[in-house]
Amino acid sequence: MLPPRQMCRKHLLGEHVEIHMAAASLRLGKNLEGFLERGLLELGKLRRRHDALAAEMLRRGYRHNSPLPVVNGVRRGKVDLGKSARDLRARCKDCRELLSAS
């Protein structure tokens, strides 16, 4: 997972929403295998990632009023950091600039 400071506004806020959606899916017993197989989720790090994104949101002056509900016992998945960085560089000019600046 990329450092939140290296993400544009759209991707920072988008990942925050996706983490809430993943947590809700877990609570509802929905299958997340596709996300896990494609290296898009690290379920054991949802809380830590959420908190890092929320801290960056606050640092940028955005509001954060959505604490992550408790998600217990799931420790599967691994995000490929290199692939994530390549994907964002290819898809987003703003993220490309932030990633290049660091």
Image (cartoon, helix red, strand yellow):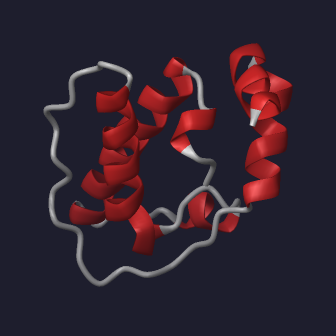
Above or below — where is 60 with respect to 12? above
Q: Residue 6 in the image: x percent, y percent?
A: 63, 35
Query: Where in the figure is residue 75, as x and y percent of width and height?
Result: 43, 81
The image position of residue 92, as x and y in percent, is 74, 20
Q: Is residue 68 above or below residue 97?
A: below
**In the depicted view, which residue is nearer to us: 22 or 2?**
2
In the rendered view of the protein, which quadrant contains the C terminus? Answer: top right
At horizontal 63% and vertical 71% (from top left) the residue drawn is 78
Look at the image and tell me whether residue 51 can be seen: yes
Horizontally, residue 73 falls left or right of residue 70, namely right
Query: Is 59 placed above or below 76 here?
Result: above
Above or below: residue 1 compared with residue 61: below
Q: Quadrant of the N terminus?
A: bottom right
Q: Is residue 30 visible?
A: no
Q: Residue at x 54, y 60 (%)?
A: 41
Residue lying at the far top in this picture: please name it: 93
